[in-house]
Image: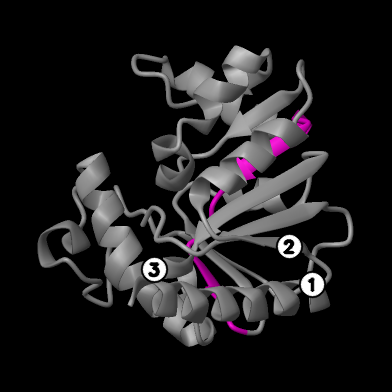
Amino acid sequence: MEKIEESFWGERCKEVVDALKKNNFKAEYFTKAIQAKDKIISSIPKGSKVARCGSMTLTRLNIFEELAKKGCNVIDPYVPGLPPEETFKRRREVFYSDFLLSSANAITYDGKIVNVDGIGNRVAGMIFGPKRVIILAGKNKIVPDVETALKRIKDIAAPLNARRLKRDVPCRVLDRCPGSCNSPERMCNVTVILEKRPSASRITVFLVGEDLGF
């Protein structure tokens, strides 16, 4: 059964990789997350300035710790106890980084990348600024279309992140989007759909045949 599932998801992921390439993104499929992790670490030279986004996919793989050990300058706005002004400063440094590492909230069958942000530093960095952007995503992020992508984000990714971050928002309690949210701590403020690669960005998508992150 495991081989059947691996074959099924391998074929599905490769179809999405092909669709991403048609949309002018660089894209590559990996069976296992460790393979993608090794590729990311080996492709980023020592001394590079690497911007960190709030991705559970990357965090759980300890990619930023490995890059710091390698001698990269990791820009991390998520260090506990940072003053707000320093957090904001580090988020702005995304635009001047050599690499921005992130995940995606959803990727459609036809190769669109869909993200919803609270502040917008992640999606802004994907669109313009860093010399290179690497997006690492598991097969659980694959959806048929943009409508399904947005539903996935609202009913799965957002409630899970609300619990993780202990946000005072309705979806944290309901485990789904109620359809309206006026909370000051609302996380779904900016929606960006990358239909094609932005002309000034170099974006590579590593798609993995395992479930990763939210």
Q: Position of residue 83 (x, y in %)?
A: 42, 15
Residue 148, by quadrant, is bottom left
Q: Quadrant of the N terminus?
A: bottom left
Mark carried by residue 21: 1
Q: Nearer the viewer, mark 3 or mark 2?
A: 2
Q: Earlier in the sequence, mark 3 or mark 2?
A: 2
Residue located 44% across and 61% down the image: 210
Numbered badge on residue 140: none
The location of residue 165, given as percent across then percent down, is 26, 41
Q: Which residue is situated farthest in the right direction here?
A: 199
Disc number placed over residue 27 in the picture, else none: 2
Nearer-N-terminus badge (2/1): 1
The answer to whether residue 59 is seen in the rendering is yes
Q: Residues within 10 Å of mark 1 (few under 14, many from 20)?
A: some
Q: Residues within 10 Å of mark 2 (few under 14, many from 20)?
A: many
Separation of residues labelled 3 and 2 (CA atoms): 22 Å
Toward which corner of the image does residue 182 lie, by quadrant? bottom left
Q: Which residue appears at 52% of the width and 17% of the height? A: 86
Tag 1 or tag 3, which sits nearer the N-term? 1
Query: How does the figure colour the protein chain or chains?
Result: one colour
Against 159, residue 2 (above or below) is below
> Type of residue at label 2?
Ala
Q: Which residues are magenta?
A: 95-109
Tell me if residue 132 is in the magenta stretch: no
In the image, what residue type sits under mark 1? Answer: Lys
Where is mark 3, residue-wise? 153
